[in-house]
Structure formats: C-alpha cells, structure tokens
Amino acid sequence: MTHLKKWYIPVTQENRAELQTWWRKQALKSRWTKDPDTRLREGAFLLSEHPTDSSYYWCGSEKGFTARYPSYQKITLEQFREITNPKPMKHPEKWYIPVTKENHAELNRWRLSKRTSKASKWDDKFVPGSFLVSEHPYDGTYFFSDFGNFLKCHYQEITLEQFREITNSQPMKHPEHWCIEATEENFKELKAWWEENADTDFHFQVGYTLMSEHPKDESKYYAGDIKNCIADYPQFVEISLEQFRQITNPTQTTMSKSIRISRELLNEYYNAATTPQKEYLTEHFKLDGTTTVEAIRGLHDMACGGWKPKIKKNHPNCFPEDSKYFDFSEHANKPGQRVVSADVCKSLGLKNDFIQIRNSDNQELDKRSFYLSPTYNWELVKDDNATVLIPTKKS
C-alpha cells in the first residue's frame, strides 16, 4: 500500500494505547504532551500531522474535520501500523487495562479465576472506571480503583486484544443463563425487552437484575442487584450491555454473520472498483471471499448506480428488505418464537404458543413463516374478497 502523507484514524478503546505510543513520540515537544498523564481521548482523531498546530490530533467531529481538510484520508489500524511501522508491542510484565462497561464481565471473569479466596470486601470496588492489573503488589484484588502515580510509574497500559493474548482468554460466549443489572443508562433498553418477554403483574425497575429466565417464575428479573442475584443463582453469568444486544437482537447478529462469496465474484468487484472501494474490499473481504453481511451492504452503499442493483442481485439474502418475503428474524430467538403477548393470548382464550415464528431447515420457510400450534384445528376460508383463518378446538 502506498503510504499516505495526510491521514487520520479514529481513537477507540481498543486502539488508544497503541496510537498513544506513537502520538507521544511525535508530539513530545508539544505543549499537548508536557503532562505525562495526558492521554488521547476516545472519540478524537489521530492525524499524520495537524495542519495548524503540533497536537497531531483533532477533537471535533469527523464530518467537521473532513469538510475543513478534505485532503486527509481515513485509515484503518492495519494501515496505521504499515505507515508508522511500529514493531509489535511486546507484552509487558506489569500491565493494566481500564475497566469499562463493555469489558467488565470479561475482565472480572479472569480476575476471579486468579484469586485464592472466594470473596473480598473490595469486590464492590471493581467497577467501570477502575483498572485491572497483572498483579497487585500488596493484596490479591488484581485492581486499582484510580489512576494514581504508582500505577503510572510501574505499569504499562495494554489493549483488550493484548489482554486476551496475555491471559489466553477469549471473548465471552453468550451464556445459556445470563443476567444484567438495570441502571439509569440501560434501563429503557432492558425494560423494552422485559415487557415483550416477561409474564408478570410486577414491575421491573432500576436496581433490579434482568435475567434470561427466572428459575421460579415468569418474571425474568431478580428484585435486587446483580451481586445478590448471582449469589442466589450461581448458574447465572453477568453479561455486558453489548452482549445483551447481541443476544436479544438477532438482526444485528445476522449483520455481522460471516459469509463467503466466490473468488471470481470478489475479483470482479475488485477489478471494477475505484481506489477507495479497493481499500474497502481489502479491509473487509479476505482473499478466499470470506466477509460479512454488513460488509456486503457497505460495498453496496459506496457503489455507483450501475453496480448497486448487481450487488443486490448477487446477494439477495443480504438485503431482506428488498425480498418478497418478510424477515421475522428479530422475533426468532424469543421464548417460543412468541408473536402475540401472553396477556393477549389469555384474553383470546388461546395458549401462548398458538402462533409462532417458524424455524426450519427449509430456507423458503425459515423465519419467513408462521407455525400454527397442533393444539387446534386450523381452517383457511374465503369470505367474499377476504381470506380468514379459523381456529377450532379439537374434540
């Protein structure tokens, strides 16, 4: 790849430590890095060089930056490594990683596995905003509550990717029995799922713990915080909000599902692509044609008018909104693929499972059709110009 002279890259939780190492070296004499505690802020943009000062970064919006400096091109982390040619970062002996809402469950799983005692009076302090460490010098907590001078002087920050390499851990798979505590920030999102899936006259509220299934009833929550919930039901595993979204939003999961296209088709796309499109293909498509539904849709969005219909025709399953079929995937992972809420079923005098989303090996039916319970007889009848479905009781 030809190294760009003018580039920018978004600073994220995952790449900040790596980008910051290069940034500190470049801006060493700048007023921006005189304070050793200064850190690149997530959401900012690292630049090859700032057009007007020596900061090497931009704190405004991406849209505002590209409008003002259109000659700068966005790059990926892989391209950043090629351009700056940093040697692979060795894993430090003493390391720390900031705890966030997204990585808390994964980091805590490792921390608890390292401890010799089952519980600690400090466990409640291991929250987003604290710092997991390779080993605490004085006790067995494996974390610091704040970013103090001791941590700054003796430990080196690592990324989540490095943490997984060092600890030989993998991103947590979705557990069968999961729970997540309701907070002011996530309550609206959690409550929407609870209202569709729970069957109870009681109310879910902030401070309670949402559960995949309550072992004793249909409430789908524990009336208390997550610590007490897991103490009472140890088979349940705490998940992050991101995991909750992946579990409860199969449409989103489908978008990131890995698929494979033919090498011939990939070559056809590449040969017809512009330079930015070729860079996109290189980043999102492997040589064997492996990619994702989301990448196909992204390629469609940046294609010219003549190629948009070709891409849709080549990958109809990636564009369900254009299919003659309906896509019921969003409801497919709900208990019993329930279509009608429990209270409505009860008012109709029918069982909760009288109509469900169909899961089938037949692609023409799978998540595109309804399954009618064999508890009843079903009759399709014409009434003038209307078609009606009549359930009757079996004798």
Image (cartoon, helix red, strand yellow):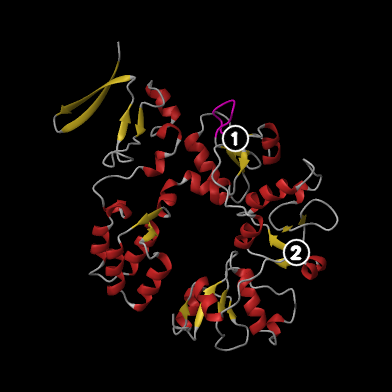
Residue 214 belongs to magenta span: yes
When asked about the image quadrant of residue 150, the answer is: bottom right
Q: Which mark is residue 253?
A: none
Cβ atoms under marks 2 and 1 closer than 8 Å:
no
Residue type marked 2: Lys
Q: Which residues are magenta?
A: 213-220
Mark 2 surroundings: few (<14), some (14-19) or many (≥20) residues within 10 A: some
Image spot of residue 78 (x, y percent): 51, 72
Q: Is residue 87 left or right of residue 124?
A: left
Q: Which mark is residue 94?
A: 2
Residue 33 belongs to magenta span: no
Image quadrant where one finds the C terminus: top left
Q: Which mark is residue 221?
A: 1
User: Which residue is pictured at 58% across the width and 52% down the height?
Assistant: 170
Q: Nearer the viewer, mark 2 or mark 1?
A: 2
Image quadrant where one finds the N terminus: bottom left
Image spot of residue 7 (x, y percent): 50, 81
User: Which residue is pictured at 61% across the width and 76% down the height?
Assistant: 87
Q: Compared with residue 294, is residue 55 higher up or lower down, i.e. above or below?
A: below
As drawn, which residue projects farthest toward the left? 384
Q: Compared with residue 3, is residue 222 higher up or lower down, i.e. above or below?
A: above
Image spot of residue 154 (x, y percent): 79, 68
Residue type marked 1: Tyr
The answer to whether one can see residue 205 in this image is no
How would you classify the magenta stretch by its main secondary structure? Answer: loop
Q: Is residue 291 left or right of residue 188?
A: left
When asked about the image quadrant of residue 209, the answer is: top right
Image spot of residue 86 (x, y percent): 59, 77
